[in-house]
Image: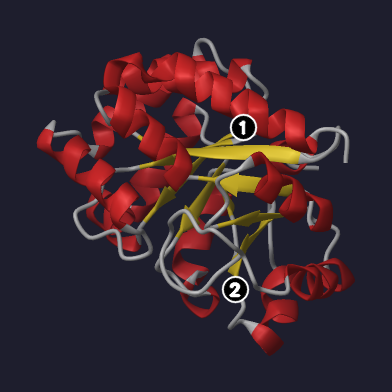
Amino acid sequence: MSKISDAFVNGKAFIPFITCGDPDLQTTVQIVKAAADNGADIIELGIPFSDPTAEGPVIQEANVRALKNEVTTDDVFKTVEQIRTEVSIPLVFMTYANVVFSYGCDAFFERCAQVGISGIVLADVPFEEMGEFEQSALKHNVEMISLVSPTSEDRIAKIVKHARGFVYIVSSLGVTGVRDHISTDIGSIVKVVRANTNIPCAVGFGISTPEQAQAMASLADGAIVGSAIVKIIAAYGKEAPSHVGAYVRSMKDAIKDL
């Protein structure tokens, strides 16, 4: 079993997303530690990028703030090295093809392995175009995490048969962001996923409250939250770690007994 899949063994997983370098890299280290200390099972780390097409305004603005700090991909790798001295849970990058291409595909995944990144979500790379990335990723024991969405339909079975780590179920059409209501029939997507793979699945995009996390995790194996956490970081800046920790604790508490 993979380190990522192992994170789901003891119950429903809570997976927070954090943009590296917002408000600064040292605070990122403290936020990740606070999230891990308060029950996060896996943490997604966003590498700042100038054109994050899957992201809504909240995470786009976090990218802008990080890029204003001149945060580079190398800076993020060094930050992960620092995080790894205190945090042992799986860390997963969420980024875009261009970030990997510009670094050099093989060099990028080699560096991931060196610093202890277990997996990667490439938000703008469809399943059919993952091959080139996957070859380099697997060579360095980094798992490519597959996304399925409400529009994947008859492709879901094919996608998840090749999935590694966990299957990322996108709850809603459009970009990331807090939503008042998630109307997608997540249960039917989960059913297809489970019919075609034993790998766990987690739901992301739009979840912000403990009630929403509980509803999604009751159907799937975990819940992923990004924009709601990035909003907390935007509001509190360098004081954000304790606030993020308290939020993560409330979300984990909501799903742990399911």
Q: Is residue 144 above or below residue 189?
A: above
The label on residue 145 is: none
Q: Where's residue 24, x and y in %?
A: 24, 23
Q: Nearer the viewer, residue 133 or 181?
A: 181
Q: Residue under circle 2? A: 149
The residue at 74%/42% (across/down) is 2
Q: Residue under circle 1? A: 90
The quadrant in which residue 66 appears is: top left
Tell me if mark 1 has few (under 14), some (14-19) or many (20+) residues whose alpha carbon lies within 10 angstroms of its own. Answer: many
**Does 86 sit left or right of 177 as displayed?**
right
**Does 6 sit left or right of 228 as displayed?**
right
Whether label 2 touches label 1, CB < 8 Å: no
Q: Where's residue 233, x and y in %?
A: 35, 29
Q: Secondary structure at mark 2?
A: loop
**Does 34 sit left or right of 60 as displayed?**
right
Kind of residue at badge 2: Ser
**Does 65 sit left or right of 243 as displayed?**
left
Q: Is residue 143 visible?
A: yes
Q: Nearer the viewer, residue 233 or 77?
A: 233
Q: Earlier in the sequence, mark 2 or mark 1?
A: 1
Kind of residue at badge 1: Pro
Q: Nearer the viewer, residue 199 or 171?
A: 171
Q: Where's residue 215, x and y in %?
A: 75, 53
Colouring mode (rainbow / by chain / secondary structure / one colour): secondary structure
